[in-house]
Amino acid sequence: MINVLHLRDTDRICGPGKTIMETALAATPGEFSHTVGLFQLASEPPNAYEEALAARGIGVIPIRTTSRFDPRMIGTIIRAIRDHDIHLVHAHDYKSEILTYLVSRLHRVPIMTTMHGWIMNDLRYRTYWRAARFVRPKFDLVVAVSGQTRDAVIAHGVPRHKVALVRNAIVTANYDPSTVDSGVIRSRAGIPPTARVVGCIGRLSREKGQLDLLHAAADVRRSHPATWYVFAGDGPDRPHVEALARELGLADRVVLLGHQPDVRPVFRDIDLLALTSHTEGFPNVILEALCMGKPVLATDVGGVREIVFPGETGILIEPHDPAAIARGLRQLLDHPDEAARLAAAGRALVNERFSFRQRVLAEEALCRNLLRGMREGATADA
């Protein structure tokens, strides 16, 4: 049995968190076992992600500390590795990369990381990013979730032979629109059943470009005054989103749902998804939207162009361009037949190329090869 410890710094069910969870559930029985170590302050109660993991029978190790970056976490992780007979530590963000590397310096254990994307919004993130960039080349394996991410990782100094491309995927059976009741979100938010609704699903944070979407919405309102905009997610930019919606006169058409542990009812009730990010890795939310039969407008960042093919599976625009967002929204709103065609082609693409089981098999093969190579190396050294 190969026991893997995933390290993640989050309190909510996000894209990378879903990938970890579904990987654990789809693991090859009798060969792989996955446990998740979550960084938490000593005073924090169990969070939404911890509860979701526990509810699905996935082992959770709370790594509790008195501050956000307490060196004593290193000892806690080493004890967890020993107590749970961990064979491989898998980091999933800047903070966990730094800690995983430091752990490996004190306790011999193979280490890998998955690069889900890039965030450098403030001094804390930039500091973590610089430190993580320094230690990442020293990892035994770096998994990139898109071709663009792979190229960036190599450009940042990780040896090419250590980098593997394993694109994100979803469990498509979980996103069957026929199994989700319609009208739940519209009823809760007071949105008329016949209104057109643009959805934006993701953390409310600067790099997600929600302010660009609001500026575009103000433009679109001149021709489509009855269109609503639903934001599902929470985060540090929420006050700015609320303030700009009021400033632009959109408060009566903008709904902020907050964090949604289950986004399927949101997909069911929107007419299209707008992803206006400034940076991404390989966004699961696009795969989920297409699988739910929703057309997608997205910015050309990260691995988005590996899913959204202009005129085939969606509309692709440049980031930081509210005018382009507005044009794309009008195109989808004014041409519902074209929007339906794009969504249908996108759904077929997701079902054909982004099977989660295929992703799990690819990652498991990488883990086997990594551990085999290290065992052979140790034998040769002996």
Image: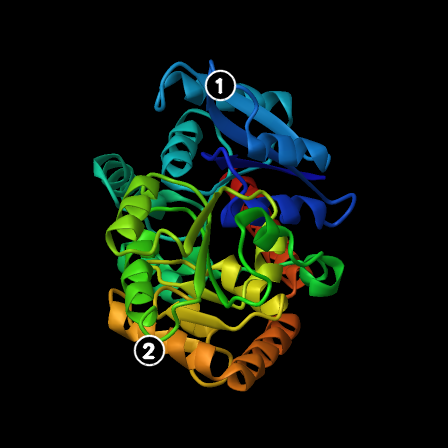
Describe the element under mark 2 as helix, strand or loop.
Answer: helix
Q: At numbered mark 1, what does the secondary structure look like: helix, strand or loop?
A: loop
Amino acid type, callout 2: Arg
Q: Is residue 242 left or right of residue 27?
A: left
Residue 195 seen anywhere in this rendered image of the structure: yes
Q: Residue furthest left?
A: 123
Side (left or right) of 249 relative to 164: left
Q: Which residue is mark 2?
A: 327
Q: Position of residue 342 (x, y in %)?
A: 53, 81
Q: Is residue 158 visible?
A: no
Q: Position of residue 256 (x, y in %)?
A: 44, 47
Judge whether 124 appears above or below 257 on screen: above
Which mark identifies residue 287? none
Residue highlighted by disc 1: 44
Rendering quarter of residue 88: top right
Question: Percent from the top left, x then y, of residue 378?
Answer: 53, 40
Within 10 Å of disc 2 (Cα), the crowding (few <14, some 14-19, many 20+) is some
Return the disc, 2 or 1, that comes first in the chain's sequence.
Answer: 1
> Who's the residue at 38% across and 58% down the image?
280
Q: Give the residue drawn at x 63%, y 66%.
A: 292
Q: Is residue 26 above or below residue 195?
A: above
Q: Nearer the viewer, residue 307 or 3?
A: 307
The quarter of the picture where residue 326 lies is bottom left
Residue at far right of view: 30
Give the amino acid type for the residue marked by disc 1 in the picture. Answer: Glu
